[in-house]
Amino acid sequence: MNMIRVAEAQNSPEINNERSLLSLEQSFDLDNNSANRLYSEHLNKYMLQLFDILGLKDMDMKGARGVEIWLNDGRTLLDFSAGLGVLGLGHNHPRIIEAERKCHERKIVDCIKVAPHKLQGALAYNLSRFLPAPLAVSFLAVSGAEANEAAMKLSERVQTPKGKKKFLCMQGAFHGKTHGALSLTTATDVQSGFLLGVPKENVIYARYGDIGSLREAISAETDGSGGNSIIAAIVETIRGTSCEIPPAGYLTEFVQHCRDNDILSIFDEVKVGMGRSGRFCAFQHEAAVPDIVTLAKTLGGGKREVAAMVTSQVLFDRAYGNKQDCNLHSSSFSGLGESCAVAIETLNILQDERLIENAERMGDYLSKGLQRLKTKHPKHVLDVRGRGMFQAIRLNFHQGLAEKLVDIDRNPLFQTYQTVLIGALVRELYDRHDILVHFQPGARDILHFMPPFVVREKQIDKLIAALDDILSRGLGDATVRFVAKNIKRVFKGIA
């Protein structure tokens, strides 16, 4: 590949000399050092520092397909992070690329706000075919947080005329970082320093997976006449931060308790919906049907920002059921033509290629491999959790060399010593085994595996073998190498 440096680009005759703009071709061909400098100076230098700590700053990507990412240095990576759930179909699925080509060939209208767009209706119809009745009416959005905001606003429109003023969410939940969704997010300290869209006094909490705790929270808000102040209760059907599955029957009871108390139920399927759990939605492992469900990530086929809130016609009518109110909630970029086309094709791919079934089958295969690791390395692996293409292992960082590294917590770049240890594993898998995985700041002892639904057994075998190699050598071995590679930052932070 013909790489280009920023300094050379600025002197190129192809450049717009008035503003020294980079052309698209020059942007494609930036060398890695120049690209990182632009990222540091014009995006987020602190994120770049975190990528550097994990060894990922110099991941100079050439292309990708399916589960594989190809680097300019000749390495081929297996992507078990999948854009944190976005890449259900994998990178650059050929039918998604073809769907985009068809849009360009037809010169479709991408954005029209003064007339209906046929692709919006087609997408909403297709979504309804995957969901149980009465979930049939969609609001299209561009992110999971925005879909959750739409769910909150619809709930408010339905319930606030009754005098209800509060939302019930789960302790440790994550629903997004926009102001409204952030109000219901307690998984990490992401609320710190922000004014919230919903005041704290209007948010109450229950323990995840604990129906007794849900009952207590509702009871505490119930007055003498039997009424309560709760607009809606929202829950992740599989917890995104810790990869926890609630007890069997929990979601069904959750919905029933909400209905018995005139509380709307919202299931957040942003991360695990669209087939990742081995069902289109994770709640479909039970008989539960919520009032509202939110979807995103895989819906965009790995190429477009598409999300949806889906509810019943009855609730939509109660919230926005007249010509004056029908557009009270809207978004400039929701339902763009090509985005809808890609989402339509995504749903067809899931069905035609039986990828949801493959997610369940490969999930069983992955789970068995992780369970073997737990049996072989009981001192290191405490728990295997999740289902389908969203699984994780919980690691024991309170033994061996790890105990001697607790003082590293004084380094502000490492919030806790657990961050060092989980970071060491992420870097070891990348440096030595060409595998990408991730963890969440709110659960630093849990290593996540979220491969695309197209993953094959031999690719899972490579992951299991890599983890076995690392655990056989001991967590301390990987940690020593990680600290050695970041020693300058460690001493700088301590100093």
Image (cartoon, grey):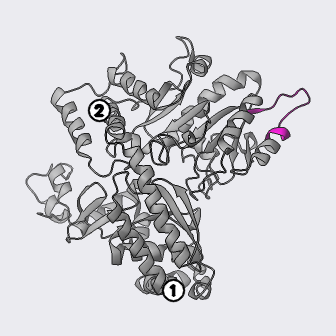
Magenta stretch: includes residue 220 = yes
In the foreground, 154 or 86: 86
In the rendered view, would you say 464 is above or below 195? below
Q: So how many labels did they put on this image?
A: 2
In the rendered view, would you say 307 is above or below 375? above
**Residue at the image point whose x is 52% and y is 17% from the top:** 326
User: Badge 1: few (under 14), some or many (20 or more) residues near its Cα, within 10 Å?
Assistant: many
Image spot of residue 112 (x, y percent): 33, 22
The quadrant in which the C terminus is found is bottom right
Mark 2 belongs to which amino acid? Answer: Glu
Left or right: 277 in relation to 59: right
Mark 1 = which residue? Answer: 476
Mark 1 belongs to which amino acid? Answer: Gly
Q: Which mark is residue 166?
A: none
Gap in angstroms between the C-alphas marked 2 and 1: 49 Å
**Residue at the image point whose x is 48% and y is 28% from the top:** 139
Magenta stretch: includes residue 166 = no
In the rendered view, would you say 491 is above or below 285? below
Outermost residue on the right side: it is 224
